Image (cartoon, rainbow, N blue to C red):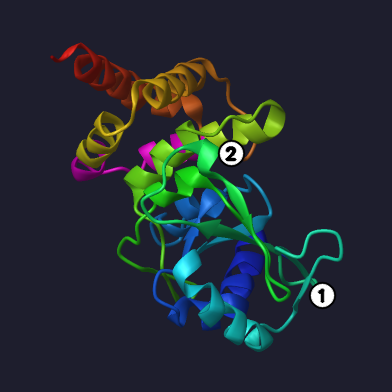
């Protein structure tokens, strides 16, 4: 079965949650959802990340019984595993809007849906919804996703994938998105700015991986951002 078909079926399965204000898709599938009609999605990872603002957590929990074909993992109940072959994994991750620092990460305890609330996810804001496979999908704005990924401190393959998601997002970014990335960067403290710039440098050196966004194609955009960030750092 094609990956696109599985992605579409999974979005239909979780569509009841899209009616809760603030819930949005972020992570590795976001660039796929923004592709032009007919484009083939890239398999960065086989899961969908659902960003759940803490303020609507109870509303989401009330709708969980509407999800068909997915069940909580016995080892990690914030991860829902498919019970059918036409679906992929769904990850629930918590968001505290306005939070930025990775140090602000904490666990939201809940018998229905415990969540890791990641500090940098506070940068995400809902953007214009997209229609994918007939499903109206709320998706996080490009700028917040780019900066959030560049604030991640992950090594190995997971870290490489995060940066390749940034490459995919930059390939779809508009001039307004780039300007918004600059504003978000300018609002960070010096230590977080350093993390963002360091990860962007790593991305500028990254080599392509099969079936993932091409970092070589993204290098002009990466170098442009590094120059813009440098100007911000040098400004009085």
Q: Residues within 10 Å of mark 2 (few under 14, many from 20)?
A: some
* In-front residue for pair 12/112: 112
Name the residue that disc number 2 marks: 212
Kindly indicate whether the residue at mark 1 contacts the one at mark 2 (C-beta within 8 angstroms): no
Residue depicted at 67% across the width and 35% down the height: 158
Q: Nearer the viewer, mark 2 or mark 1?
A: 1
Residue 209: where, in percent of width, then height? 63, 30
Q: Residue 125 versus residue 208: which sits nearer the camera?
A: 125
Relative vertical location of residue 213 with respect to residue 25 in this rendering, above or below:
above
- Ranked by sequence position, the earlier of labels 2 and 1 is 1
Query: For the magenta stretch, what is the residue range?
Result: 164-178
* Disc number for residue 43: none
Q: Which residue is identified by label 1? A: 83
Inter-mark Cα distance, 2 to 1: 26 Å
Q: Quadrant of the C terminus?
A: top left
Residue at figure coordinates x 64%, y 88% from the top left: 66
Is any atom of residue 141 visible in this view?
A: yes
Observer able to see residue 23: no
Q: Secondary structure at mark 2?
A: loop
Q: Is residue 236 magenta?
A: no
């Amino acid at each position: 079965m094609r990956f696109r078909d599985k992605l579409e079926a999974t979005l239909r399965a979780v569509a009841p949650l899209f009616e809760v204000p603030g819930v949005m898709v972020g992570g590795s599938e976001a660039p796929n959802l923004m592709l032009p009609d007919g484009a083939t999605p890239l398999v960065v990872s086989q899961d969908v990340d659902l960003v759940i603002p803490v303020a609507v957590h109870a509303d989401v929990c009330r709708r969980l019984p509407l999800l068909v074909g997915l069940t909580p993992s016995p080892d990690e109940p914030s991860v829902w595993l498919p019970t059918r072959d036409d679906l992929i994994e769904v990850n629930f991750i918590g968001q505290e809007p306005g939070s930025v620092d990775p140090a602000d990460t904490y666990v939201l305890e809940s018998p229905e849906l415990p969540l890791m609330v990641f500090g940098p996810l506070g940068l995400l804001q809902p953007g214009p919804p997209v229609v994918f496979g007939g499903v109206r999908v709320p998706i996080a704005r490009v700028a917040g996703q780019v900066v959030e990924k560049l604030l991640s401190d992950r090594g190995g393959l997971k870290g490489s994938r995060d940066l390749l998601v940034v490459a995919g997002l930059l390939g779809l970014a508009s001039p307004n998105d780039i300007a918004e990335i600059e504003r978000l960067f300018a609002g960070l403290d010096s230590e977080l700015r350093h993390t963002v710039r360091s990860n962007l440098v790593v991305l500028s050196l990254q080599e392509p991986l099969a079936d993932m966004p091409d970092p070589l194609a993204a290098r002009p955009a990466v170098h442009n951002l590094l120059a813009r960030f440098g100007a911000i750092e040098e400004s009085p």
